[in-house]
Image (spheres, rainbow, N blue to C red):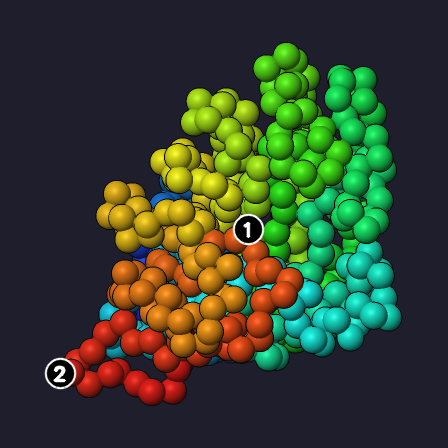
Amino acid sequence: MAQERHGNGGWDIVAGRPASPTGEWYCKSVAGAAGVPAPGRRLDPCALRLHKAPMNDAETGGRPGASGAAGSAAGEAASGPATASSRVLAALSGSADGSPSAPSRARPPVWIMRQAGRYLPEYQELRARHGFVEMCSEPDLAFEISMQPRRRFELDAVIVFYDILFLAEAMGAPLEYNDRGPVFLEPLRDAESIRRLRPFDPQAGTPAVLETLRRLRAELPFDVAVLGFAGAPFTMAAYLVEGDFRRSGEQIKRMMYAAPETLRELLDALTVATVAYLRAQIEAGAGAVQLFDTWAGLLSPADYAEFALPFTRRVFAALDAPAILYVNGCAHLVDAMAASGASALSLDWRVDLAAERERLGPGIGLQGNLDPSALFAPPDVVSDRVRAILDAMRGDPRYVFNLGHGILPQTPIESVEALVETVREFRPHRISGIAEGSDGT
């Protein structure tokens, strides 16, 4: 049994697949695989999240439809997540219709990569008392930091505060944080060192991020998406082989050309780990996840097709929630990214979003793509830059506003406020010359 989307409004209790053959995502209980509580237990809307649903009877083995008072009552109980759960999830999953009368699409959703972090005064107050690793590893602190940008800006999504490198550390790669940033103390540059990596167990290796996600989902209303994330296999391999954050790519490319089978062995191990990691995040409450392939922009299209795309595809194929793919420096890779199986592509500022929509068609979400450096402009200039992107993507139901990369540490708060306010006030549709609403919702 599963909670499922039915039309624009409610959720019905049905068995196995969407009530509408056009539906793609259904709502499942985190508490149990069946998706609904045992008989006699009240449905807990805080334990729901979006999942892919099989689309036909051949996939479900056939089932009778469900109807009647029981189904209606359960649908009413889950009416909170019924409106596609959130603007973000609606855009990612394709469940928003973009019409003027659709309240979920009165404006595009907005969140910001690295929205929890050093540009916020409240973050700096905590950072003065706690180390970075402690802030990630203590769920109370990670929860508070994750919530800070939501409280200040009322963003449409909260992404969990954590670090992508902790997965590799949990696999046995010694990791140190110092004044230069994170450093892997023993870079992996031969087959022997790669084979010393341990199989990854998310419950044992990264319990803090899972607990933080559980708390976020329990605390936030369902119009706010909870996002998890991970580094893509190629990017994680690059960090492990290079040893630090300098993105020259010298060592990873040397291995790619001199020892391709060794690199594939590392990529395979990281793919298995990343699947387990993201599945655990989804089970803990993430409604969608983003895969960061920050280093993949260093690759030619041919090398991306051989050493990044196949492993990214394996990750997305194994997930049952909407997933976003981000590549920094992606202009030459957009077509390949679109073939990855991602629900949406997060594109950087070097790409014309409207042109890519025209080329790719409506079947995939797009996210982005203001240059983070533009936030150092005066607030009125920021608003103009944001509005230009919104105008270009006007009426696109599968668009999410974001930056083209993570927000920079010294970004002025006033510029972030201008960004969010501009998005919230934007109206993609006008009827008889009158804006459809004025409340930003």
Q: Nearer the viewer, residue 56 or 329?
A: 329
Rendered view: 211 above or below 366: below
Name the element at disc 1.
Answer: strand
Q: Quadrant of residue 236?
A: top right
Q: Residue at x 76, y 17 (%)?
A: 191
Name the element at disc 2.
Answer: loop
Label annotation for residue 290: 1
* Residue 425 is at least partly visible in this image: yes
Kind of residue indicated by mark 2:
Ser
* Residue 33 is at least partly visible in this image: no
Q: Residue at x 56, y 46 (%)?
A: 291
Say whether residue 148 is left or right of residue 397. right
Rendered view: 72 above or below 38: below
Image location (x, y in percent) of residue 371? 46, 57
Point out the residue furthest to the top here. 258
Rendered view: 437 above or below 365: below
Q: CA distance from mark 2 to mark 1?
A: 39 Å
Q: Residues within 10 Å of mark 2 (few under 14, many from 20)?
A: few
Give the residue number, with chain letter if any, for mark 2.
432
Say whether residue 15 is left or right of residue 186. left
Q: Residues within 10 Å of mark 1 (few under 14, many from 20)?
A: many
